[in-house]
Image: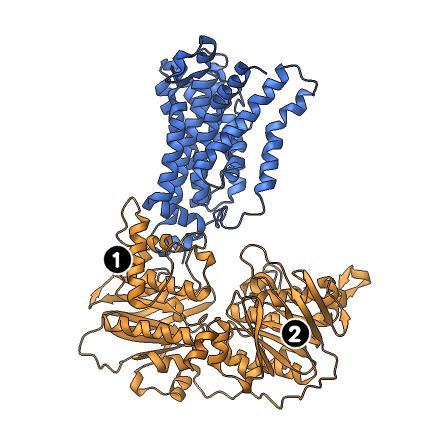
Chain colours: A orange, B blue
Amino acid sequence: MLTPPLSSKTPPMISMREISKSFPGVVANDHIDFDIFRSEIHVLLGENGAGKSTLMKILYGFYRADSGRILLDGKPAAIQSPNDARALQIGMVFQDFTLIPAFSVAENIALFLPDLDTVVDLEAVSLWIEEMSARYGLRVNPDAMVYELSIGEQQKVEILKLILSNSRLLILDEPTRVLAPHEVDALFQILYSMRQDGYAIILITHKIKEVLECADRITVLRNGCVAGSLLRSNASEDKLVEMMFGRKLSGLKTGKKVIREETALPVLELQNVHTHGEGAETNLEEIDLKVYPGEIVGIAGVSGNGQRELGDVVLGMIECVKGTKHLFGKDVTNSSIQKLRRSLVGFIPENPLTMAAAPFMTVLENMAVTKTWHYALQGGLTMDWKAIKADVENTMERLGFSFSLNIPARSLSGGNLQRMIIVRELTHDPRLIIASYLTRGLDVQSTLAARQALIQARDDGAGVLLISEDLEELFMLSDRLIVLYGGRIVGSFTPDETNYYEVGHLMTGSEVQYASNS
Amino acid sequence: MTLLSVLGVLSSAIFSGTSLLYTTLGEIIGQRSGIVNLGLEGVMLVSASAGFAVTAITDNPYLGVLVSIIAGGLMNMILGFLVISRRANQLASGLALMFFGFGLSAWIGRSYVGAKIKGLPRFPLPGSSNLPVLYSSLFNFDLLIYLVIPMAILIWWLLFRTRWGLGLRAVGENADTAFASGRNPLLIRYQALFAGGLLTGLGAAHLSIAYTMNWMEYMTAGRGFIAVALVIFSKWNPLRAIVGALLFSGAVAFQLLLQSSGIQVSPFLLDTIPYVLTILVLIVWGGTRRHTAPASLGRVYQGTE
């Protein structure tokens, strides 16, 4: 059984013992033991699907464990709902935000205040927010509506919500996912000062670098089990990787980058493209962009700064109100999506479940749906299912993915769904690939395979537009890097000309501040 | 058009708008918690017939109003059981409730068609006693009319200024968030539907016990659906609903006036004026739905495992 290397003389604040939880078809948590101490940052590390979020949602009462116990200061605690957890001063920030866009910041925070008066005095709440936000450097405007805030600001509101809700144990599920590097630093400073004030903090992440930076204690989950629990002083990068994956991973073969020929015809060319967004969507302005065959162009930017719109405008899902769009040298500014699809364009969108899959159709049907003309027999009366299956299996083998083809798409996990889309979009050797958040939701091995597939396509002469928030991925894969901020291109580099910090600052529009600091 | 006819339109708009406004307020509460009640028509009919029957039997209009209110709350609880506990589709459940209400109200009211009742007493509007009798008689209102605007303000205050209202609106936006904040979304939705049902009952009571003082089958004539449209018109805001209800019932009264003044347009077309107005308003106010409609409106809350 687990014996954590205890350094603290104090007993744990909360102990979770023998926690098990199954979802249909998956054992998410299998007899997990987990201890949390006061004044400590405890990092819960593991791959996607290792069971980290599930374990913490059980602690917060959002899910109920199938078996196991939770002890608070050695005494059994019954946590059946978030209401129970909050009464025990446990607070949690979920991975997907639980802020209500149509509410103001103050209303969102008031919703989570434990001793809110029957008649809500929002002005008093706002004053309190301002007081606490000054103390922890989490500046937000209490009167702003949440839909007006950037993702980084929303993250601040989530953390403020926890502090003000009188929690002594804070659970943060991947809080750094949407933050730029300097914002991550600022977040860690906040966590350090909260640790000083006696808070216990649990940080869920799969980024090893962050773990080594901020953790006091680390617990690694693998396949729903505890792979180990150790103090920061005993941890090293190699050791953590080994615990996460059970073995050493082979690296990515990026291969030699093909020198792009300026004389070649670009596969994609955008000239002075403008779009007109509705409501909260971002307008693209003055986008000039060329993608040549045999190169990967990375698009960096914090979400909401026009990356999604860029992908959509290339595929024709939103209209260019000004400017022109050329594909393989032909003007396609006003062409239909179907016409573009027929000209060998592969598109891996931001959110596979809602934007690329028909959840109640089978995986195989989903594979055919973007290429129905290709597989139509007898003028479309029937489909050549055998050919579809052969093509798909061929691509799956090439990428090293495997999943069932005859089940409804909705029963696939997030990672497999993303694999399904990648397989579909890479099946017909596209000449232009637009990939948004290619590896979101994939575990490390599939991430490698997906990236390898993209590099393979690049080496075979395809042009790739890679949209991502993961700077590591962009620096690793891109031959050229473009930064979007507020719908405009604010930087264009080759990866060796720049660094994370410069790009991070450009992404968040704080370049001026960066220049004066450096 | 004389001053008298204009005042007549106004008076008639106030009378018929009152039941509409109570019903709209009730539906706003329900929809703010995420539930569309398409069965309003049926709820109103059952409330109106039950209240009317009790008034006719006991000769006490106040008791009748009370029975109407309770009947409205109970009818909404039927919908609540279906869409909250049984997680049924809201639109289908609402329509079923409506047809159930048609039948039930016809049965309740069958022996009271044409019955004479003592309606809610009317009091002159303060200050109108100085006017000539012909005018001042137009401004004799019952208690429910005097209470309707304070009620709209009260509902606004409840929704936007109290802890209960904050939780209720949160359930309508994102029930998971409300659950994560330590609330019980199922209980809150039941509360919202019950409160909404009481208000719908009040609206129905005004229709049968105070305004027409009469019962006939299907006397609501689409008011339940107009109330649903008025909720959208008012952008889920009780104060805007005051304007909406007055505007709509004003249009109804106005077209009646046009018909009686012998204008050369088919009465069938004139009948459509209020609805054309509603369509126009929805066209003009549509397209800006973002962040006005409750985000989870119509969605079943599945709960967590």
The answer to whether tags 2 and 1 share a subunit is: yes
Where's the N terminus of chain B, which quadrant? top right
| B253 and B191: which is toward the camera | B253
Secondary structure type for disc 2:
strand
Q: In this view, does B60 lie above or below B32?
A: above
Q: Is residue A93 visible?
A: no
Residue B15 at what x, y percent from top left? Answer: 47, 21
Query: Which chain letter goes with mark 1?
Result: A
Q: Which chain carries label 2?
A: A
Depth check, front residue: A6 or A194: A194
Task: Please state, as top left, top right, bottom left or bottom right, where the C terminus of chain B lies in the image.
Answer: bottom left
Amino acid beneath label 2: Leu
Q: How dense is the environment of label 2, judged by Cα within 10 Å: few (below 14), some, or many (20 and up)?
A: some
* Marker count (numbered): 2
Quarter assignment of residue A256:
bottom right
Q: Find the residue positioned furthest to the top.
A: B133
Residue matched to label 1: A87
Residue lying at 51% horizontally and 88% vertically, measured from the top left: A250
Residue that badge 2 annotates = A289
Q: Which mark is residue B34?
A: none
Q: Where is residue A331 in the image (x, y as percent from the top left)?
A: 76, 68
Closer to viewer: mark 2 or mark 1? 2
Asked which secondary structure carries label 1, the reply is helix
- Name which quarter of the figure residue A195 lies in: bottom left
Q: Which of the two discs, 2 and 1, labels the residue nearer the N terminus? A: 1
User: In this rendering, does residue B288 appear at all?
Assistant: yes
Label 1 crowd bin: few (<14), some (14–19), many (20+), radius 10 Å? some
